[in-house]
Image (cartoon, rainbow, N blue to C red):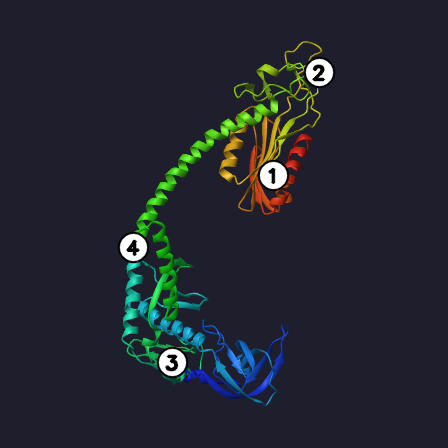
Amino acid sequence: MSATERLYYNDSRLLEFDARVIDLSEREDGTTAVTLDRTAFYPTGGGQPNDTGMLGEARVVDCIDDDSEGVWHIIRGPTPQIGDTVHGKIDWLRRLDHLQQHTGQHILSAAFVKLFEAPTRSFRVLEHECEIDVALEDSADERIEQAVDLANQIIWECRPIQIQQVTSEEAVSLPLRKEPAREGELRVIEIDQFDLTPCGGTHARSTGEVGVIAVRSWERAKGLTRIQFMAGVRVLNDYRQANRTARAIAELFSAGREDAPALVAKLIEENKKLMHRVRELDELACRVEAEALLRSLSEPPAVADGQRHLEAGYRPPPDREAVTDSSRGLSADESIRSPTVREGPRFRTGSSSDQIISATASHRPTSGNTGLSDGIVAQEKPPFIIAKVFNDRDAESLKHLALALIAHPNVVALLASRDDDAARLVFARSSDARGDMNSLMRAACKVIDGRGGGKPDMAQGGGKDTAKLDEAIQTAARSFAAGSV
């Protein structure tokens, strides 16, 4: 037997009452739990949220049902003493909303049973809409709309709703829509000649108080049909918001609200075609950009007399047709080098400016039968490294540029972009270049608080810390140049 008499059982419109405090307890969050001998406050349960309101001068922020211990009224403000008589007042708009949603659920659930023998398995009142999970296998639009039409017909007929108290023995003989969740005396909600269901929630006095029911969406979930709906005042608020949105879209097209969907569909189709064309052009542009990046990296500086000469760290730009033996990684035009020449990988890095950073790394000469004269050995050719950070470049364009770069022999591309407050990375290498892009990517992603990976020849990733994006790319470039991957 509960310590608290539930006044809302008999009258869901009872908004004010007097009661005696029978217990108090302080809570860790600074609130106080007050137990009364009687209450009109509905505690959370059965898919319906709790009431809020005032208890004396204190604000009731929550109500918790503790079965035999009674209802706990969680308050903030002046705390009464045990034995005090306090005045309670329910927030009417919240109560009205909840009784509309809960009664609406009874009506809609009964409609699915009447039409399709599809019972409701669960019910939830959420912040903006409600959900029911219905055992409806065929959730065609026509079926959902048919159930909504029947539910609204019952609402507009203003059928009376009555509350009955029955014993468990009496309940056996009643045509209840669902089995009772507990034993003993039951509270049964009856919608005249339409529904009879055991329930402990707050309900309207007639179906007309629900106003209207509207279904927003439905989907298959866990073998059931999950239906999002709303009733009463929520439908009006939702219509106002939807109407404002529809009118705003229509105004963008200088058209009527009813014409907007067709115009939006046309715009989307045109945008798809344009985006496809943009991607094609981006691929072409990336090939030109790749040529320019490699050319700027490989051009030697001019000397005072205007003549150019070969210096350490320079060799002619790569020729995409030059690799003739991918197993050796040597191009036909540079298979012979003097053993006195020591070249390290050269790379370009930067975001707003292209700064060439010199770096050296030891490379082991190619051994074995190379067909070279005595005293001359083949030197492994250092790769061209392009390390660059862009602004507002999407992942697909970044990948296009990487693919354009590695279409040239012996190239490593370490590319990144800041795009919508997110960091994007693409690391790739030519088929004849050394290095594990997957390892480099994982290390770089740690710097920018992200993750990524891929294969040894290409990897992609991203992260949140765009401020460290330059550091991540610089670290990756130097790590590669040092031969650590």
For label 4, the SS is helix
Q: Residues within 10 Å of mark 1 (few under 14, many from 20)?
A: many
The label on residue 441 is 1
Q: Which residue is mark 2?
A: 339
**In the shown orientation, is residue 339 left or right of residue 194?**
right
Q: Amino acid at mark 2?
A: Pro
- Label 1 or label 3, whichever lies nearer to me, is 1
Mark toward the viewer: 3 or 2: 2
Query: How far is the residue under mark 1 from the one under mark 2?
Result: 34 Å
Q: Is residue 135 visible?
A: no
Amino acid residing under circle 4: Glu
Q: 476 or 166: which is nearer to us? A: 476
Q: Is residue 90 above or below residue 383?
A: below
State the residue at coordinates (55%, 84%). Answer: 56
- Residue 472 coordinates in the image, percent (x, y): 64, 40
Task: Report which residue position mark 3 lands on.
Answer: 188
**Neighbours of disc 4 within 10 Å: few (<14), some (14-19), many (20+):** few
Q: CA distance from mark 4 to mark 2?
A: 78 Å
Q: Earlier in the sequence, mark 1 or mark 3?
A: 3
CA gap, disc 1 and disc 4 = 50 Å
Residue count near mark 3 (Cα–Cα under 10 Å), binned few <14, some 14–19, many ≥20? some
Q: Nearer the viewer, mark 3 or mark 4?
A: 4
Q: Say what amino acid the circle numbered 1 marks.
A: Met
x and y percent of residue 147 in the render? 30, 66
> Quick one: SS at disc 3?
strand
**Eyeballing the image, is 116 above or below 95?**
above
